[in-house]
Amino acid sequence: MMNNSYSVLMSVYHKECPEYFQAALDSIQRQTLPAGEIILVCDGPLTEGLEQVIQEFCSVFPNIQIIRFLENRGLGYALAEGLQHCSFDLVARMDTDDIAAQDRCELQVAFLQEHLDIDVLSGVLEEFEGNAATVEEAMKQVLSRKELPLSHEEISDYMKYRNPINHPCVMFRRDRVEAAGGYQSCAFFEDYDLWVRMFLNRSRFANLSQTLLYMRVNHMYSRRGGFGYAKAIIAFQVRLFRYGVIRIPQLCCGGVLRVTVSILPNWIRKRIYDAKLRKH
């Protein structure tokens, strides 16, 4: 029998939009299988608007724990700290500008209770652009779907080339994440780095074929470009090589290809993502 013994782990910082943050929290509150708790890390001082959203949400969802950093430390640090405060072994990640499908967590908890060998579980996310505040509104603004391999065996192979897990809608077993060293500082690739370390530590992965989340992609392609992002790509490719996940040919070819895409104009990069990595 299912119960709500799972935590939701979130991190928010000052650049987030209060309206989008509110929509994300509302989508968690409306889950068909309610969360046992929400762990919210405030990564540095927040705007008045974000603080107001938190204050109002606390009045309707008392099982929320707020952790505050005096200064912005980055997503890896925020999630690592937040994970230490999660009371349950099952932890669902949620970003502060996305909208979760209403049965997202129920589907994931049911699967993980039935498949005790699986440690990390994600699924399909649908990308939308606009100011949607509900699932129904987001569905009308969907541009594309991001699907990934389903089985552990397929994911193991895919991991060498691309991130095999949709982080915004992942649920995982906390003890297995901690056994692999937890979230660490790895600019732009905190999640991918964690999956690789978990894989090397013999964790098992799966993805559901159902849509679990509606991901807001406003300005996403501009965030995935520029020389700062290109530098992070090179650093992470070197890290994958040191882990033994990729070899010299993959390091060179893959690194050059990804860096080239990152420094292209935004409209070209968007077309490449849409053509190669998304379904419409």
Image (cartoon, helix red, strand yellow):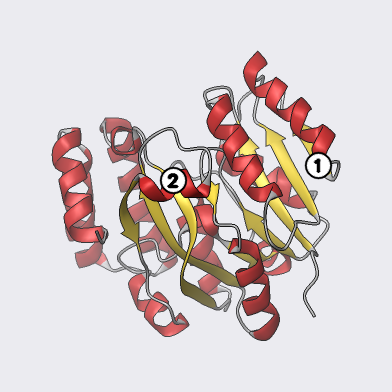
The residue beneath circle 2 is 138
The residue at the point 28 percent across, 39 percent down is 230
The disc labelled 2 sits on which kind of residue?
Answer: Ala
x and y percentages locating residue 147 in the rendered image: 36, 66
First along the sequence among labels 2 and 1: 1
Left or right: 191 as drawn, with respect to 9: left
Q: Residues within 10 Å of mark 1 (few under 14, many from 20)?
A: some
The disc labelled 1 sits on which kind of residue?
Answer: Phe
How many numbered dots are placed on residues in this image? 2
Instruction: Name the mark nearer the viewer: 2 or 1.
Output: 2
- Report whether residue 189 is seen: no
- Report whether residue 280 is seen: yes
Q: Dot 2 lies on which element?
A: helix
Left or right: 150 as drawn, with respect to 231: right
Q: Is residue 236 above or below residue 122?
A: above
**Which of 31 and 114 lies nearest the eye of the viewer?**
31
The residue beneath circle 1 is 61
Farthest residue in the top direction? Answer: 48
Q: Dot 1 lies on which element?
A: loop
Quarter-wise, where is residue 26 in the image?
top right
x and y percentages locating residue 154 in the rendered image: 37, 81
x and y percentages locating residue 277 in the rendered image: 25, 59
Q: Is residue 15 above or below residue 151?
A: above
**Which of 101 and 204 lies nearest the eye of the viewer?**
101
